[in-house]
């Protein structure tokens, strides 16, 4: 009993000790918000089989950050315009009929990333590239919690309001267009929402690893369910768990928060895949 009590006390201490620090509580709050939001939004490109679009947007925000800094406007505005602009460019290239979607996305994220690095170098923009790429727990401020909560509420509300149209478009874009739905508007609305989710994740997990939090938990959920609404629910739960595990790992192991969260997301995926594979194998044998 004494050993069990000691182990329980140590476990509780390990969970509560980091909460004594303001920066950790702030990061945990924002992590919970984006951990739920990113996979919910990420389910749509996953089902549409354009998961690479998240990577393209993540790289595409970099020129917008540099330009916004030079113009003296909010960096999030520049990142949003640049990210949505990249999706418009990808859509235009794809609509020409001879370029595959994955090729257009690969071209755009490489081009925008190169453009961003060039502008940062030429204009000597003071951006912490390591924190930008991998996230920085210490950069999360109380105001970030409010901004993330408002943006998440708006995005999730919009998804709930237009869920039937989004469901139709996601599983049958051609049929949705034939039925008269505004598929172009739905597409750009999804891309705008994905861009906002990635921008929210910048400070905590970094621009590159925001993709892991967007796609990873959604992919894990897809192993267990096929219905989109359940995929979104489970994806949000897996994202929340990945954010919590990653932040505690980052705190105790002195790791970049983004890297720790991405590794936690991958660990959840591999664990779920192993369990699902074993269950399927036993079902076939029975």
Image (cartoon, helix red, strand yellow):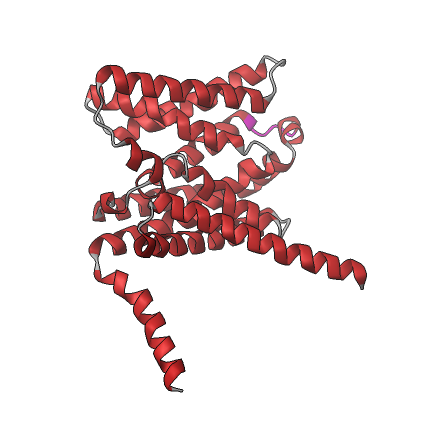
Residue 182 sits inside the magenta stretch: yes
Query: Which of the pair 133/26 is nearer the observer?
Result: 133
Residue 74 sits inside the magenta stretch: no
In the rendered structure, the answer to whether residue 103 lies left or right of residue 254 reads: right
Q: Position of residue 101 (x, y in %)?
A: 58, 23
In the rendered structure, the answer to whether residue 39 lies left or right of residue 121 reads: right
Residue at 67% over, 54% down: 277
Residue at 61% over, 28% down: 180
Residue at 76% over, 61% down: 283
Residue 229 visible in this rendered orientation of the protein:
no
Residue at 45% over, 48% down: 263
User: Image height check: is 72 above or below 192?
Assistant: above
Q: Position of residue 39 (x, y in %)?
A: 48, 45
Residue 10 visible in this rendered orientation of the protein:
yes
Q: Position of residue 134 (x, y in %)?
A: 35, 39
Q: Quadrant of residue 201?
A: top left
Q: Which region is colored magenta?
A: 179-183
Q: Quarter holding the N terminus?
A: bottom left
Query: Which of the pair 158/261 is nearer the observer?
Result: 261
């Amino acid at each position: 009993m004494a050993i069990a009590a000691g182990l329980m006390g140590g476990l509780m201490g390990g969970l509560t000790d980091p909460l004594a620090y303001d920066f950790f509580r702030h990061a945990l709050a924002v992590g919970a918000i984006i951990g739920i939001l990113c996979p919910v939004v990420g389910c749509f490109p996953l089902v549409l089989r354009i998961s690479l679009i998240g990577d393209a947007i993540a790289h595409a925000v970099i020129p917008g950050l540099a330009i916004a800094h030079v113009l003296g406007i909010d960096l999030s505005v520049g990142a949003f315009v640049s990210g949505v602009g990249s999706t418009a460019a990808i859509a235009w290239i794809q609509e020409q009929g001879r370029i595959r979607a994955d090729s257009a996305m690969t071209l755009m994220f490489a081009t925008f990333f190169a453009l961003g690095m060039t502008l940062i170098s030429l204009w000597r923009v003071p951006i912490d590239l390591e924190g930008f790429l991998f996230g920085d727990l210490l950069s999360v401020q109380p105001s970030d919690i409010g901004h993330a909560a408002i943006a998440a509420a708006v995005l999730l509300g919009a998804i709930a309001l237009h869920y039937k149209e989004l469901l139709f478009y996601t599983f049958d874009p051609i049929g949705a267009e034939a039925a008269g739905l505004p598929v172009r508007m739905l597409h750009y609305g999804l891309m705008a929402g994905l861009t906002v989710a990635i921008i929210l994740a910048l400070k905590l997990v970094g621009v590159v690893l925001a993709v892991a939090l967007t796609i990873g938990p959604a992919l894990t959920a897809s192993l267990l369910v096929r219905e989109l609404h359940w995929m979104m629910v489970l994806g949000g739960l897996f994202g929340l768990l990945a954010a919590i595990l990653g932040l505690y790992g980052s705190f105790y192991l002195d790791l970049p928060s983004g890297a720790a969260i991405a590794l936690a997301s991958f660990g959840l995926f591999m664990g779920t895949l192993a369990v699902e594979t074993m269950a399927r194998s036993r079902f076939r044998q029975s």
